[in-house]
């Protein structure tokens, strides 16, 4: 990181700069608090002994920097007022360099976390505007989100989490990890978001939902199938043009994709009915496309 050391004790400033440089930081030393210096540094170590009357203006003008006060005593002028102006912390002279490094790394990590959170929030806000996702948060877990796309269900679930200020554990029914989670008998305060209910066959689906009702689960299903559960958020009737891919498939390619995807989910009679063809036609297409029957 680029670190500016503002200190009139030359030996102390050089000692700090030397030890910080040893661990890879780029340090600059000055004994003058220049109020025209703005946001050119990641960290500013500011000695209270040379602050004068303009330190609050200087701190505010460098609000994006990590400013740590180096002080000889604790008072309103050395601690309270600088922190109110935007300084992050203080360290009392004489101090161990390891303690200063710990503070610098702590606030660097904190700043990185805030930057990442802001990035993900910006992305989520962008996606939320792109999709027609409603905001009826009338249920508490457990409940099922029934949608026409996984993306819509995910956005609804994350919107719910932000609105209720809760955190999820994430599982998919495509993997076995959720079974170990349920074996731990999680408390009602532990909320899990479980996707891909449509991957289970009807009997397996019923058995899973019978168990799910005991826990704080939010479950997504991308299907038009009828679901029996006490609480269902049905957003499957909301159109989302953004879910249509950029690639247009031929009818043959579409048939192949759909048969492959839903092969193990429905028995032949039901899958053929959903595709608007006979069971014999389904068998012929499976043979034509080289799709092995899933057991």
Image (cartoon, rainbow, N blue to C red):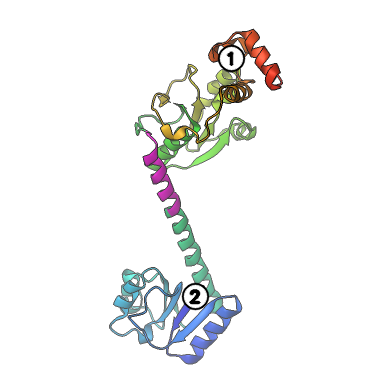
Front disc: 1 or 2: 1
Instruction: Give the residue furthest to the front.
Output: 250
Q: Locate residue 35: give its quadrant.
A: bottom left
Residue, disc 2: 2
Residue at 39%, 68% in the rendered image: 64
CA separation, marks 1 and 2? 63 Å
Residue, disc 1: 271
Residue 251 shows which numbered tag? Answer: none
Residue at 55%, 24% in the rendered image: 198
Check disc 2 and report its element: helix, strand or loop.
strand
Residue at 51%, 30% in the rendered image: 215
Q: Main secondary structure of the magenta part?
A: helix
Magenta range is 119-133
- Residue 67 place in picture, x, y as percent: 41, 73
From the viewer's perspective, is 38 left or right of 265?
left
Check disc 1 and report its element: helix, strand or loop.
helix
Residue at 54%, 86% in the rendered image: 15
| First along the sequence among labels 1 and 2 | 2
Residue 164 in sight from this viewpoint: no
From the viewer's perspective, is 32 left or right of 244?
left
């Amino acid at each position: 990181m680029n670190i500016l050391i503002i200190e009139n004790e030359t030996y102390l400033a050089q000692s700090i700069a030397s030890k910080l440089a040893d661990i890879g930081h780029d340090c600059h030393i000055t004994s003058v608090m220049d109020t025209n210096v703005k946001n050119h540094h990641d960290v500013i170590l500011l000695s209270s002994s040379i602050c004068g009357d303009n330190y609050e203006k200087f701190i505010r003008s460098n609000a994006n920097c990590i400013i740590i006060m180096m002080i000889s005593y604790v008072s309103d002028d050395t601690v309270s007022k600088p922190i109110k102006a935007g300084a992050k912390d203080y360290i009392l002279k004489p101090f161990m360099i390891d303690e200063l490094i710990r503070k610098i790394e702590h606030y660097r990590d904190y700043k990185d976390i805030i930057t990442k959170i802001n990035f993900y929030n910006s992305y989520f806000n962008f996606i939320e505007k792109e999709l027609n996702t409603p905001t009826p948060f009338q249920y508490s877990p457990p409940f099922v989100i029934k949608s026409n796309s996984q993306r819509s269900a995910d956005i609804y679930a994350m919107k719910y989490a932000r609105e209720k200020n809760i955190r999820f554990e994430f599982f998919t029914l495509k993997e076995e990890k959720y079974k170990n989670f349920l074996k731990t008998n999680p408390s009602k305060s532990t909320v899990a978001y479980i996707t891909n209910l449509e991957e289970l066959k009807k009997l397996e689906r019923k058995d899973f939902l019978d168990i799910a009702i005991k826990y704080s689960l939010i479950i997504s299903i991308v299907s038009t199938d009828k679901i029996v559960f006490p609480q269902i958020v049905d957003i499957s009737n909301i159109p989302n043009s953004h879910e249509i891919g950029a690639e247009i498939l031929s009818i043959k390619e579409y048939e192949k994709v759909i048969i492959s995807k839903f092969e193990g989910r429905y028995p032949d009679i039901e899958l053929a009915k959903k595709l608007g063809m006979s069971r014999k036609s389904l068998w012929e297409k499976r043979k034509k496309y080289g799709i092995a029957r899933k057991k």
